[in-house]
Image (cartoon, rainbow, N blue to C red):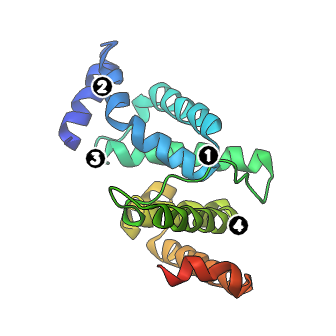
């Protein structure tokens, strides 16, 4: 998917082609949902947030700057909407009923029962740690380590500076380290031994 073809679909949408925006949705629905899910930690709410993010993008499409990547602009809308939802919820601890999908590096094609259990425990630990971070830190971590965006891309998305993003990531890593240190060693043993 090239940025040039994204701009073409945007132009066609603005020109009144009813199917053009559908192509943009097909291209980025997975990315938008994954970001919303990692931020909100609840499948139904993430689906609603993703739908709302696409609606906001459509309504504000005339504000899109074709000099920027469409994906970055769309993920920025999604992240801002998710942060707004989190603020409205005013929860500091999110439900652990539905764990995050595992990061690709944590899974293999055919895990054995022990490996599956360890992976599940590791995923729950990662989810607990993410849930303990403030929304701004959580978003920076997700964009950097799950979406592999550069500091510059994250800064542009969030309307801040690269140094601010580096600072958020440093503080987030420190908070995660503090979280790990505060846990009883016995509860981490099975997870850390096999990492």
Residue in the picture at 25% in, 34% down: 7
Task: Work out which quarter of the rendered image holds the N terminus and state it.
Answer: top left
- Pick the residue in front: 191 or 49: 191
Tell me the element at label 1.
helix
| Residue annotated with mark 3 | 67
| Residue annotated with mark 1 | 82
The reply to whether the C-beta atoms of the residues labelled 2 and 4 are less than 8 Å apart is no
| Residue annotated with mark 2 | 23
Residue in the picture at 38% in, 59% down: 104
Q: Earlier in the sequence, mark 3 or mark 4?
A: 3
Tell me the element at label 2.
helix
Rendering coords of residue 50 (x, y %): 53, 35
Q: Earlier in the sequence, mark 1 or mark 3?
A: 3
Alpha carbon distance from label 2 to label 1:
23 Å
| Residue annotated with mark 4 | 132
Binning the other alpha carbons within 10 Å of mark 1 as few (below 14), some (14 to 19) or many (20 upward) gives: many
Q: Is residue 27 above or below residue 42?
A: above
Of circles 4 and 1, the one toward us is: 4
Alpha carbon distance from label 3 to label 4:
36 Å
């Amino acid at each position: 998917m090239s940025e040039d073809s994204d701009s073409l679909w945007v132009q066609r949408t603005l020109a009144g082609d009813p199917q053009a925006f559908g192509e943009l949705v097909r291209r980025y629905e997975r990315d938008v949902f994954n970001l919303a899910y990692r931020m909100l930690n609840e499948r139904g709410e993430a689906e609603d947030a993703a739908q709302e993010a696409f609606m906001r993008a459509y309504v504000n499409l005339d504000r899109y700057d074709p000099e920027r990547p469409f994906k970055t602009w769309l993920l920025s809308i999604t992240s801002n909407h998710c942060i707004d939802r989190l603020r409205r919820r005013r929860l500091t601890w999110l439900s652990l009923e539905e764990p995050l999908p595992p990061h690709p590096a944590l899974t293999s094609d055919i895990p054995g029962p022990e490996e599956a259990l360890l992976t599940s425990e590791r995923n729950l630990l990662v989810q607990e740690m993410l849930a303990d971070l403030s929304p701004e830190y959580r978003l920076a971590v997700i964009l950097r380590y799950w979406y592999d965006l550069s500091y510059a891309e994250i800064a542009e998305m969030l309307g801040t500076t690269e140094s601010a993003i580096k600072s958020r990531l440093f503080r987030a890593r420190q908070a995660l380290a503090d979280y790990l240190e505060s846990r009883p060693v016995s509860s981490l043993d099975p997870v850390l031994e096999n990492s």
